[in-house]
Amino acid sequence: MDISAVNDLSYEEFVNIFGNVVEKCPVVAAAVWSARPFLSFTALEAEIHKFIDVLPQSGKEGILRCHPDLAGRDLQRGTLTQESRAEQAAAGLDALGPAEASLLARLNREYKQRFGFPFVVCVRAADQRAILRQLAERCGNEPALESVRGIEEVKKICRLRLRDIV
Ligand SMILES: NC(=O)NC1=NC(=O)NC1=O
């Protein structure tokens, strides 16, 4: 849809359509609806970034905690959101070999134990090898840096999900 159609949406339609551009955080769409009319895609994206950027650290970490583990329990149980399922499948995370699957599960556990929130990466911008390499590298980051990195990835995921709509 084009940006004028976005601006014509009711609040309910807007949250129904944009509610998962940030995984399981419909409050983001509910909040930025107030900023309509949006002059462009970029202006809509900027309002989402503004909402995220002013959150306290606990809010940013809360956004990260709303993300499902890569190839984790939600994928195994079929409880991923539609967007996450498509993204994880496109990256081949639903068809990992046993070695990769156990390495990813171990690194995800280590990462979550160290940082208190899950490893988040925009999987549409990466492949299995790149994801494993990035996860291994980022496990060594300082916590303050890592929450910034995670939010950067949330914004990349959000941009692609927005592009699927607008
Ligand atoms: N933990 C994650 O990074 N999850 C995800 N990244 C994506 O791009 N889609 C997901 O579900």
Image (spheres, rainbow, N blue to C red):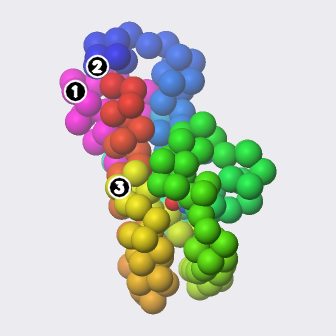
**Residue that badge 1 annotates:** 40
Q: On the image, which quarter does residue 117 sit in?
A: bottom right
**Residue that badge 2 annotates:** 3
Q: Is residue 47 visible from the viewing direction of this image?
A: no
What separation in Å lies between label 2 and label 1 (alpha carbons)? Answer: 6 Å
The N terminus sits in image quarter: top left
User: Element at badge 2?
Assistant: helix
Q: Is residue 118 visible from the viewing direction of this image?
A: yes
Q: Mark 2 vs mark 3: which is more N-terminal?
A: 2
The C terminus sits in image quarter: top left
Q: Position of residue 93 (x, y in %)?
A: 56, 58
Magenta-colored stretch includes residue 138: no
Q: Nearer the viewer, residue 65 or 75?
A: 75
Q: Position of residue 27 (x, y in %)?
A: 56, 39
The magenta-colored residue range is 31-49
Position above or below: 154 against 16? below
Q: Say what amino acid the circle numbered 2 marks.
A: Ile
Mark 2 or mark 3, whichever is nearer to me: 3
Q: Nearer the viewer, residue 109 or 24?
A: 109
User: Element at badge 1?
Assistant: loop
Q: Residue at x 60, y 37 (%)?
A: 82
**Residue that badge 3 annotates:** 125
